[in-house]
Amino acid sequence: MEKTLVVKNLALAFHQERRPVTILAGVEFEISSGETLALVGESGSGKTLTALSIVKLLPPQARLETGEVRLNGQSLTSLSEREMENIRGRQVGLVFQEPSAYLNPVFTIGNQIEEAIKSSLSRKEKKERVAQMLAEVGLDEKHYWHYPHQLSGGMQQRALIAMALINHPSLLIADEPTTSLDVTTAVQIISLIKTLIKKHHLALLFISHDIALAHYFADRMAVMYAGRLVEIGPTRTVFNSPRHPYTESLIACLPEKYKPGEKIRAIPGTVPDFANLPSGCPFHPRCHRRMERCFREEPEMFPVASALVRCFLYGNSVATEPGN
Amino acid sequence: MRRFWQRLWKKSKPAGVALIVLFLLYATALLANFLSPYPYERQFREYSLCPPTRIHFIDSQGRFHLRPFVYGITVVNPAFKRYREDHTRLYPIKFFAEGRRRILGVEPPGKIFLLGTDLHGRDIFSRILHGARISLSIGLIGVSISFLLGLIIGGVSGYFGGRLDTVLMRLVEIIMTFPSFYLLLALRASFKPNISSLQLYLLIVIIMSLIGWASLARIIRGMVLSLKEEEFVMASRSLGLSTFRIITRHILPNTFSYTVTALTLSIPGYILGESTLSLLGLGIQEPYPSWGNMLSICVGNLRILTLAPWMLTPGLCIFVTVMCFNFLGDGLREVMDPRNW
Ligand SMILES: Nc1ncnc2c1ncn2[C@@H]1O[C@H](COP(=O)(O)OP(=O)(O)O)[C@@H](O)[C@H]1O
Ligand SMILES: [Mg+2]
C-alpha cells in the first residue's frame, strides 16, 4: 500500500546556551493511508516534538539534525518555509491538546474555519463548505456565530477538527486531542475522529500518553521513551504481548489490570532529564531486566515477531538469561 | 452594528449616551452649511457682542403663536454693547428663510443669534457648527494615521523581533522623548506665518500623529510579543497561513480591545492640542473658525468675559466632546473583547 507518511531516522536537538541537548534520536515510522498509528509514551518523552518535526513547526532553538520526512511521496526536509505553508493545512492537519487555547478568542468559530480554507472559492462557496464541515464534526449551524469561549471543550475540539480537515488533507496529526476533556466527551471526540478518518480514508498519527486509549483505536502502535521509539508494531502484538520492558511496565500499570484491593504499581524511577541521559540504554536505570551491556551500549531496533523492539533481549547477542 | 450597539448599551449607559452625543455632533459638523443660519464669516458690525436671541411663543400682548418667533434687536448703546428686544417688530422663525440652502432663519431685517455674536458681530452658533469640522475631524484623522503606523510598526517589531525590533524600538524611544507640543511650536515657527488654514491643519494633524504612533507602537509590540506565543498562533501556523496573514488577521485583532480604547482616549489630545495652538494664535487662522481660535479671543480679556459670557460656548463644546470620548473609550474597553460578552 502507498505510504502517506514516512519518517526516517529523525534526530532533533535543542541548541541553547551551552551544548546542544538531543531530544529525539532515530525516530522512524510509516503510516499508510487509512491507517492509524498511535504514538504513546509518558509526558515529556518527545511525542509533541515528533509531531511538530513532521510539519517543521519547531520552537526556534530546536533543530533537526538528521532525518527525512516524506509526505505522499514528497520529501519535506529540504522545503522552504513558504513551501511548507502550502503543505500545512492542505496535506496535513493538526489537532492539539488544549482546544480552548488553540482557537482565536476574538473571532467566531465560523470565521476561523472559513479563514482556514486555502482554495480560492467565492464567499458563498466558502460558507457552504464551512456549514458542511460543521455538520460533519457534529456542530450546529448556529455555532458558526459563536465565539470560542461560548462553546464547551468538546465543541471547541470539534471546531478545531473542522479547521484541520477543511482542506481535505491526507494526514491528520492529533496530539492528545482528548487529554483535557472529561471522559464522556473524550469518548465522543474519539468516535468522531474514527468516523472521519474512515470516511475520508485519512492517515492518522494519534498521540497519547494513554496506552489503553491508543490500543482502543490504533492499527499500529509506537512506544516512545526519552525521545526514542522503543517498540513499534501492530496494536494487538504490542499490547497483548509487549516485548520491551518499558512497554511491559506501561501496560502492567494500567488500572484495569488490577484486581480489587491490589496495590497500584508505578514504574520505579523517573523520566530522565534530556541534558543528562543515562549512558547506554536510556531506560536501564528503571529496567527490571537490565543486563550488563545495557549500561554501556544503546540497542538498535530488533525485529521480534511482527514488531520492532529496541532492547538487547531480542538480538545482537547470544541470548543470555536476563538478570540483574 | 446593531449587536455592537446593544452590547455597548448593556455594558455602559454613559458610553451609549456619549456615542449618541458624538454622533449628533459629527452630524451637525457635516451639515454645518445647512444648519447654520448665517455664513461663518458674515459680520453684522452694528450687532457686535450681541447676547443670544431669545425665542418666544407668546408675544407682549399675551397672544400665543404656534410658530416661534424672535423680536427685532434695538441697539441701546453701541459703545457699551447694550441691546434690547424691540417688541414692535416680530420675526417668525422659518425654514429656508434666507434662500434654499439654510434650513433655519428669520426674514431680514430680523436677526437670529442663537448663541450670541462675537466682537465682529458674527453669529457664534454658525461659527461653532463650522468650527466643529476642524475640531472634530482633527482627532479622527490624527488617530487614523497613528493607528496605522502604530499597528504596522508595533506588529512587525513584536512578531519578528531581533535586530529589526531593536532598531524600531530605539526609534520609538527617540520619538517619545520629543515634547510634542514644543515640536509643534518649533515647526510652526519654521513655516511662513501666513500659510493657509488648510496647510496648517494638515501640519498639526501630521505632526501630532507622527509623534502619537510611537507610544501605541510600543504597547502593541509588547502585546504581540506575548500573543505570538499563544497557542492559537501555532494553530494558524499549522493551517499553513502566511506570516502576514497571521499578524494581520490573527494577532493584531487581539490587540483591538486595547487599541480602540486607547485611540478613543487619545482623540481628545488632538482636539485640545489644536485648541491650545489656536489659543496661542498659532492654530487655524481667522476668519475660519475652530473651537480653539474662537476661544482665543476671550483669553486675557476679562471685560469680554463679563460682558459676553456666551463667547465661552466653544469651550463647553470642547469639554462635552472630550468627556464623550472618555466615556466612550471606557465603554469600548468592555465591549471590544468577546470574552466579556
Ligand atoms: N521549547 C522547548 N525548549 C526546551 N526544551 C523543550 C522545549 N519543548 C520541549 N522541550 C523538551 O523536550 C521534551 C519533550 O517534549 P514534548 O515533545 O512536548 O513531550 P510530550 O509531548 O511527549 O509530552 C520535554 O521534556 C522538554 O524537556
Ligand atoms: Mg505533548
Image (cartoon, rainbow, N blue to C red):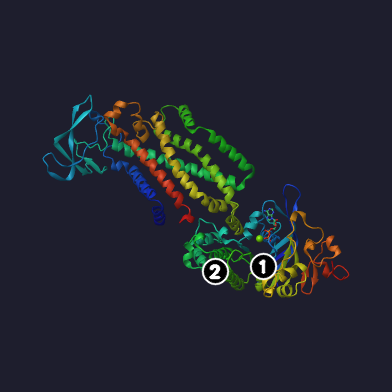
Q: Residues within 10 Å of mark 2 (few under 14, many from 20)?
A: many
Residue A51: % across, % down:
67, 61
List the residue tagged with mark 1. A210
Looking at the rendered structure, the kind of residue marked 2 is Val
Quadrant the N terminus of chain B occupies: bottom left
Cβ of mark 2 under 8 A from ligand 2: no
Looking at the rendered structure, the kind of residue marked 1 is Asp
Residue A308: % across, % down:
77, 69
What secondary structure is found at the residue carrying circle 1?
loop
Q: Residue furthest front?
A: A261
Residue B326 appears in which quarter of the rendering? top left
Q: Which chain is indicated by disc 1?
A: A
Q: Is residue A33 at least partly visible in the picture? A: no
Q: Which mark is residue A137?
A: 2
Residue A135: % across, % down:
51, 69
Cβ of mark 1 under 8 A from ligand 1: no
Q: Depth-wise, is mark 2 or mark 1 nearer the camera?
A: 1
Q: Residue furthest left?
A: B61
- Residues B331 and B295: in front is B331
> What residue do we see at 82% from left, 65% from top?
A290
Q: Residues within 10 Å of mark 1 (few under 14, many from 20)?
A: some
Tell me if residue B108 comes above or below residue A1 in the rendering.
Answer: above
Tell me if residue A40 comes above or below residue B253 in the rendering.
Answer: below
Residue B163 located left or right of residue B14? right
Residue A89 appears in which quarter of the rendering? bottom right
Which quarter holds ligand 2? Answer: bottom right
